[in-house]
Each structure stands twice: as C-alpha cells, then as structure tokens.
Amino acid sequence: MCGKEMDYIQEAFDTNWIAPLGKNVDYFEREIAAYAGVKAAAALSSGTAAIHLALKACGVKQGDIVFCSDLTFAASCNPIIYEQAVPVFIDSERKSLNMSPAALEKAFKKQVPKAVIAVNLYGQSADMAAIKRICDKRNIPIIEDAAESLGATYKDKMSGSIGKFGVFSFNGNKIITTSGGGMLVSDDEEAIAKARFWATQARDQARHYQHSELGYNYRMSNIVAGIGRGQLTILSERIKQKKAIYEYYKNAFEEIGEIEMCPIASWGKPNYWLSIILLEPDSKIKPLDIMLALEKENIESRPVWKPMHLQPFYEHYEFFSDNSDAIAVSEDVFGRGVCLPSDTKMTEKDMARVCGIIKGLF
Ligand SMILES: *Cc1c(COP(=O)(O)O)cnc(C)c1O
C-alpha cells in the first residue's frame, strides 16, 4: 500500500457508502478506462470473474470451442469450463513466451472457435497485431487476459485495450492490488453495461425481484475500489521500480553464460511484473537447484507457470504447437524457467543477496 488508499476508504466510511457500489467504484472504473484508453470498464470481484463475463459477452455456450494460451495461470481458462465450453490450448512463441501466431493459425485450420483468450504473460504483451490479424479474418473476438500486464504497452496501445475485451486483476500478487478484484474493459459500452447487469445478479428493471437471466455476485465493493484508486496513483512508480529490478538481475547475470533473462520483444514495453530467468538447456544447474538454494536462505522463488496441456485437469484437451522440435515451447520454458523475487520493497542489498546465492551455484 502507498498510503493514499486510506483517503478513499475514509471517504467511503464517512459517507457510509460501503457496499454495494458508491463513488469509488464509479471513479475507479473511469480511471482504469482512461488509463487503458478504452471507452468503458466494469469493476468486478476478480480477474477470473472478468474473464467469465467476457466469455458470456462473446456468446460462449456449452460445447463451443475457445482457444487459450497454453502457458498461463489456470484462471485464464477455468471460466471456459464454467460455461461448459471446450478449451483448446495454443503454444507460446519464443520471442515473448506468449501465444504463438503460427500455432494459432494452425489451430484455426482445424476449427473455428467462438473466442480466443490471449494472455499477456509476466507483464509483457503478446504479439497482438499478428493474433488480431488471424482472428479478424474470421471475425472471432479476442479476450485479452492482461491480469499480469496492467501498464504495459503494445506499440502505441495499452495492454488490455487491443482485444474486443480486456481483463485486469488486482489480486494480492499483481503489480497493484485491491486485496482482490478485477476489471473488464472494452470499447463496447453496451457489452460492459451487460456485464455489470450479470455481475449484480441479473436483476431486471422491475419493482419486484425479477430475473430473466442467470446472474452472478461479481461486483467490486466501494471499499475495495477505494484501495484501487489509491493504488493507481503509484502504478507508474511501480513499473519504474520493477524495471530497475529486471535491469539489476540482467546486469548481475551477464557473466553467467547459462542464465538468460526472459526475452523482451521489440513491439512494446512490459510492466516488468516478474523477473524471469531461463537456464540454458545444457546447464548442469536446474531451476529446482536455484529454488532450493534460495529457499535455504528463506527467499521465495517460483517455477514458471506449468502449461495447461500438462495439467491433470486439462491434459485431455487439444493442444496446438508450431514447434517442430520434440517439445512444445511452453513445456521447454517450464523446464528451464525460474521466477525470481520481484517485490518493489526489495533493497539493493536484498537483490545482491539473491544474485550472490544464485551465482554461487555456478
Ligand atoms: C491472476 C491472474 C488471473 C486471475 O485474476 P484473479 O483476480 O486472481 O481472479 C487471470 N489470468 C492470469 C494470467 C493471472 O495471472
């Protein structure tokens, strides 16, 4: 927290607008929409809820096929299952670790989905122009999962503003947090209004409680939105700090041939949410060695997301890769990647300690 959150929370308390809704919700929606450069936003209880409502807005129903990035967190694709639709997973490309346009094209040759969920992983935008070109040809809407990439750019656009729908998350682990929350954004104001309707139990405009559609309790509270408004004031500062962390690691590991920083594609600026390293395939030191060495010093690190096509729950769904090697790009990255400590509260001394422990292994 930065401190400013308390002012907005206090105002909510003073006016007794706690929930549901209130001024903070309205303003947080407007502020996020303005920041992302889109016409409308709906403040929701989570990023997962935002993906779910985006799928509904795209008309996804039982049995429909939805393409989704393979290398991601399960929240990207779980809502496909909520709607009893069928996920098909698309491999990553090496340039950004995000959805491979070539693999996407391959999947389109076999079948046309109802929607495509393209994830902007670890704070970096996917190659949205290439993905959009493929989807636009068949008029298929893109849901841009920008849960991890708030504040990143793709060419001259903000991450999350390129797909038909964009999704942000304010979960505790993201670049800014409201303790928990999400935002659905779009230029389609009517669709966003519909999402707000679904998110507040789909109550028809009638004096009595009447429901013509299935609803959800997905709205963000006025207190939570107050935290978000405070957090938004420090987002640009956070991005600067995150970039400095990435640069620190990059410089520190320059002399270690086995360590490569997560590739950054030239089409945009990441928000540097997490700093990732990839170990060379022939490195004797493996990700687990690094994680264990850090753990011994009470320092947390994590593996890269485990690809969805390898998940026990998802392994029987179709998966498309363009990689001619024996192994998918997502699987290769999973086997060689480590997410390093990336918290903006870290001091230079903390980072030096992390790097010292890792370099000691080589
Ligand atoms: C965090 C995250 C989500 C889900 O957001 P919640 O607010 O936690 O529901 C979705 N997709 C990705 C890629 C995420 O990292």
Image (cartoon, rainbow, N blue to C red):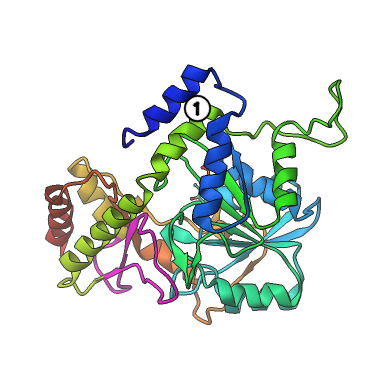
Q: From the image, which quarter does the C terminus lie in?
A: bottom left
Q: Nearer the viewer, residue 65 or 306?
A: 65
Query: For residue 267: magenta?
Result: yes
Magenta segment boundaries in residue numbering? 260-286
Q: Is residue 361 above or below residue 232?
A: below
Q: Is 34 left or right of 356, judged from the image as shown? A: right
Identify the image quadrant of residue 182: top right
Residue at 36% over, 65% down: 336
Whether residue 182 is visible, yes or no, is no
Q: Vertical placement of 3 versus 108: above or below?
A: above
Task: Locate residue 232 relative to residue 43 in the image: left or right.
Answer: left
- Residue 24 position, x and y percent, is 52, 33
Farthest residue to the bottom: give it: 324
Whether residue 15 sits left or right of residue 348 in the image: it is right
Q: Residues within 10 Å of mark 1 (few under 14, many from 20)?
A: many
Q: Is residue 305 magenta?
A: no
Q: Is residue 43 visible?
A: yes
Tell me the amino acid under the disc marked 1.
Ile
Residue 137 lies, in percent from the top left, at 73, 78
Residue tagged 1: 223
Q: Residue at x 67, y 61 (%)?
A: 164
Instruction: Name which quarter of the figure residue 213 lies in.
Output: top right
- Whether label 1 lies within 8 Å of ligand 1 gets the answer no
Give the vertical position of 29 relative to 158 (above or below).
above
Q: Of helix, strand and loop, which one carries label 1?
A: helix
Q: Residue at x 43, y 68 (%)?
A: 332
Majority SS type along the magenta span: loop
**Number of marks drawn:** 1
| Closest to the observer, 119 or 110 | 119
**x, y percentage for residue 228?**
46, 38
**Residue toward you, 126 or 24:** 24
Q: For the N terminus, give its image quadrant.
A: top left
